[in-house]
């Protein structure tokens, strides 16, 4: 499917983070900083939870014309989000190049390759590990675990948190995406 020139590489690139998976990272975000959510719309659970915690947020998304690899907000202090998994390596490299703290929710499957291992050793990247898996879709239980892959956010290199979930919960960003995609679908249905 192509949306106005943007083609998600995989359906996993369009899975939205439920609120219970956002909650555990919020306490590690300093209240006086501006958070940039670069893969998020107005009702992303990241944007909503950060605002609810009284933290200033700027959000951007490729479908509102802000490509993460081109766009940068005027003011921001750290990045918090769940990026598209298919381009995780490029996203982490850009975050490191930007030189500000970040917390990115990524599949633990990334640890099967050597690139993150080098980054953990050389850049002292950090991980927030969960006791359960996040369920991103209503139909299927996830076959992979996810963690926050961070830089200069956590107090230690490895932190453990519990996920407070009992059933599937949909992110409110899903409705934003339906509204953004609909006008772009003309001629593609
Ligand atoms: C895995 S989803 C997660 C969305 C949201 N961060 C969340 O956690 O609910 C990643 C989102 O990033 C968007 N995206 C893909 N490439 C992008 C880019 N280069 N710049 C900004 N957003 C992009 C996708 O369309 C998708 O909606």
Image (cartoon, rainbow, N blue to C red):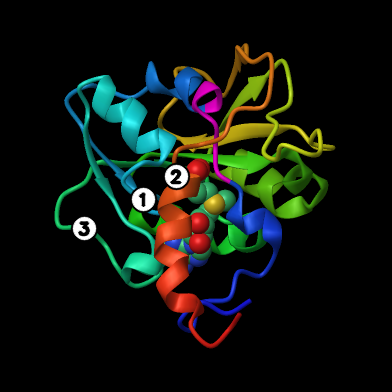
Mark 3 surroundings within 10 Å by alpha-carbon count, few (fewer than 14), some (14 through 19), many (20 or more): few
Tell me the quadrant of the picture where the N terminus can be found.
Answer: bottom right
Taking 146 as reference, is 21 left or right? left
Q: In this view, does 189 lie above or below 163?
A: below
Label 1: state its secondary structure. Answer: loop
In front: mark 3 or mark 2?
2
Q: Is residue 59 visible?
A: yes
Q: Which of 30 and 171 is in front in this view?
A: 171
- Earlier-in-chain disc, 1 versus 2: 1
Task: Confirm or reject: label 1 Cβ below 8 Å from ligand 1.
Answer: yes
> Tag count in the figure?
3
Could you tell me which residue is drawn at 40 percent across and 50 percent down? 40
| Magenta-colored span | 16-21
Disc 1 and disc 2 in contact, CB within 8 angstroms:
yes
Q: Toward which corner of the image does residue 46 lie, by quadrant? A: top left
Task: Look at mark 1 in the image and give the residue it sits on.
Answer: 41
Task: Look at mark 3 in the image and give the residue it sits on.
Answer: 73
Tell me the quadrant of the picture where the C terminus can be found.
Answer: bottom right
Mark 1 surroundings within 10 Å by alpha-carbon count, few (fewer than 14), some (14 through 19), many (20 or more): many
Task: Look at mark 2 in the image and give the residue it sits on.
Answer: 173
Residue 135: assigned label = none
- Earlier-in-chain disc, 1 versus 3: 1
Q: Is residue 79 above or below residue 169?
A: below
Task: Confirm or reject: label 2 Cβ below 8 Å from ligand 1.
Answer: yes
Taking 108 as reference, is 16 left or right? left
Q: How far apart are marks 1 and 2 (CA)?
A: 6 Å
């Amino acid at each position: 499917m192509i949306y106005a020139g943007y083609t998600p590489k995989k359906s996993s690139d369009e899975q939205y983070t439920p609120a219970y998976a956002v909650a555990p990272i919020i306490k590690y975000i300093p209240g006086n900083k501006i958070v940039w959510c670069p893969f998020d719309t107005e009702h992303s659970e990241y944007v909503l939870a950060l605002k609810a915690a009284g933290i200033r947020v700027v959000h951007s998304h490729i479908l509102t014309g802000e490509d993460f690899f081109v766009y940068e907000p005027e003011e921001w202090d750290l990045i918090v989000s769940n990026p598209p998994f298919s381009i995780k390596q490029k996203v982490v490299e850009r975050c490191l190049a930007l030189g500000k703290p970040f917390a990115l929710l990524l599949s633990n499957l990334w640890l099967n390759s050597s690139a993150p291992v080098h980054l953990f050793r050389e850049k002292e990247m950090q991980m927030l590990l969960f006791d359960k898996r996040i369920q991103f879709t209503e139909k299927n239980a996830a076959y992979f675990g996810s963690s926050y892959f961070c830089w200069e956010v956590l107090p230690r290199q490895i932190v453990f948190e519990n996920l407070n979930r009992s059933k599937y919960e949909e992110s409110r960003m899903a409705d934003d995406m339906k509204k953004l995609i609909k006008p772009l679908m003309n001629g593609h249905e």
